[in-house]
Image (cartoon, rainbow, N blue to C red):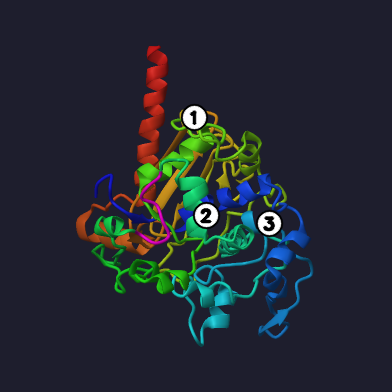
């Protein structure tokens, strides 16, 4: 890998789609809290049914009890899930199978809700719907909108929903770590295959621009987006204003104070080949309240010192990419890989490797933590020298 390596950034796409939506909020094209706006722009969203268990343990569909807002979609409280996390979705689709990365038009935009809107936090396809909202309002594809209003003003040239020939030449393919610790290519070449093979205008136009997981980029370019956020919405090099300072502040504020333990005691994933089970997204001593901003995890209590300050945002991509942005300390960064399952090695793999070698590879999450620790320690050291 090099600085020019192209990564599928998966759910790191969600931050970019959120920035696009918040630009439209700033321009008065849509409100964060208007049910009417969303119904007008996405009338089909109000017709999506809610999947529930009945008294006999069977699944059935019921009507929404309230309408969805943009804030719900961006804070993952609209009621959508992912098939690799949610048991009801898995059971519902078991007869035919579902994969959000393959044919999103069918597998994302036909999904039922798994919770009533506004009743709980659950990670899901919410921001794919936000991407569609951006397209409806702007009259542009999400790819074109982001290129004109985010990437070009930030001098980002190699980030796209449809990789260029040069980006494809530098593409890192997705790999999988097996239970015996060996690593091999993902068996189908790539989880998000269609944008990589679309070559004609017709093929491109018929391919969904997944606002939740569709971008290809590299960490240097992605960090230009993070630097813009650290700089209150303004690019520190070009001085182009991408977002207003107040918008950045809103994005980084906790949107779900009513769910302080939303990321704890999680159920095992439905597809362990994609996601390793963890009881908590970001464990902290004493289990302080957890927060969620507009599309990302929000740290409500500081990690350090030295380390992330309160208010730090972070999120990841399923093929083990992790970013964070610490506004208070002015530090942001990204660690990128292309390996499944998310979360590094499973406990079973670690045990197998221990028995075989008494050595185990560092998990990607541990690698990221080590990198981050070195950065904060260096900042502290330089501060002492001054």
> Position of 297 compared to 182: left or right?
right
Q: Which of the pair 283/159 is nearer the observer?
A: 159
Q: Position of residue 159 (x, y in %)?
A: 39, 52
For marks 3 and 2, the one nearer the N-term is 3
Taking 56 as reference, is 234 above or below it?
above
Q: Position of residue 291 (x, y in %)?
A: 62, 46
Query: What residue would you read off at disc 2?
Result: 145
Q: Main secondary structure of the magenta part?
A: loop
The answer to whether residue 281 is seen in the rendering is no
Mark 3 is surrounded, within 10 Å at the Cα level, by few (under 14), some (14 to 19) or many (20 or more) other residues, namely many
Q: Is residue 319 magenta?
A: no
Per the model, the C-alpha gap separating discs 1 and 3 is: 29 Å
Mark 2 is surrounded, within 10 Å at the Cα level, by few (under 14), some (14 to 19) or many (20 or more) other residues, namely some
Task: Please give the label number shown on residue 63.
Answer: none
Query: What residue would you read off at disc 1?
Result: 330
For discs 1 and 2, the disc positioned in front in the rendered view: 2
For marks 1 and 2, the one nearer the N-term is 2
Q: Position of residue 373 (x, y in %)?
A: 39, 34
Are the residues flagged by discs 1 and 2 in contact, CB closer than 8 Å?
no
> Position of 234 compared to 44: left or right?
left
Q: Secondary structure at mark 3?
A: helix
Q: Which of the pair 65/220 is nearer the observer?
A: 220
Taking 329 as reference, is 156 above or below it?
below
For marks 1 and 3, the one nearer the N-term is 3
Residue lying at 68% horizontally and 50% vertically, measured from the top left: 256
Q: Which residues are magenta?
A: 156-163
Per the model, the C-alpha gap separating discs 3 and 2 is: 18 Å
Taking 237 as reference, is 340 above or below it?
below
Query: What residue would you read off at disc 3?
Result: 70
Per the model, the C-alpha gap separating discs 1 and 2 is: 28 Å
């Amino acid at each position: 890998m090099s600085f020019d390596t192209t990564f599928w950034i998966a759910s790191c796409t969600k931050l970019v789609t959120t920035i696009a939506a918040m630009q439209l909020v700033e321009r008065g094209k849509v409100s964060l809290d208007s049910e009417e706006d969303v119904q007008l722009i996405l009338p089909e969203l109000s017709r999506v049914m809610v999947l529930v268990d009945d008294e006999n343990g069977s699944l059935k569909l019921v009507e929404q009890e309230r309408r969805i807002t943009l804030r719900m979609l961006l804070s993952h409280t609209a009621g959508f899930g992912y098939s690799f996390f949610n048991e009801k979705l898995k059971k519902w689709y078991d007869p035919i199978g579902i994969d959000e990365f393959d044919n999103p038009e069918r597998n994302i935009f036909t999904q039922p809700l798994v919770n009533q809107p506004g009743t709980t936090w659950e990670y899901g396809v919410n921001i794919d719907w936000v991407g569609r909202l951006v397209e409806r309002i702007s009259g542009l594809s999400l790819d074109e909108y982001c290129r004109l209003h985010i990437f070009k003003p930030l001098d980002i040239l190699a980030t796209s929903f449809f990789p260029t020939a040069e980006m494809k030449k530098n593409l890192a393919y997705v790999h999988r770590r097996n239970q015996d610790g060996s690593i091999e290519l993902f068996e189908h070449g790539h989880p998000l295959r269609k944008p990589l093979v679309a070559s004609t205008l017709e093929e491109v136009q018929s391919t969904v621009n997944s606002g939740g997981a569709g971008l290809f980029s590299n960490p240097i370019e992605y960090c230009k987006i993070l630097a813009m956020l650290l700089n209150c919405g303004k690019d520190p090099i070009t001085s182009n204003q991408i977002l207003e300072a107040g918008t950045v502040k809103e994005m980084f504020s906790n949107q779900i104070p009513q769910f302080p333990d939303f990321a704890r005691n999680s159920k095992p994933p439905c597809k362990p080949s994609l996601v390793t089970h963890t009881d908590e997204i970001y464990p902290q001593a004493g289990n302080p309240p957890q927060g969620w901003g507009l599309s990302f995890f929000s740290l409500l209590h500081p990690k350090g010192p030295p380390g992330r300050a309160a208010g730090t945002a972070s999120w990841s991509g399923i093929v083990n990419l992790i970013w964070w942005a610490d506004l208070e300390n002015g530090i942001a960064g990204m660690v990128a890989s292309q390996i499944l399952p998310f979360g590094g090695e499973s406990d079973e793999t670690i045990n197998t490797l221990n028995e075989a070698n008494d050595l185990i590879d560092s998990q990607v999450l541990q690698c990221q933590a080590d990198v981050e620790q070195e950065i904060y320690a260096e900042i502290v050291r330089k501060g002492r020298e001054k």
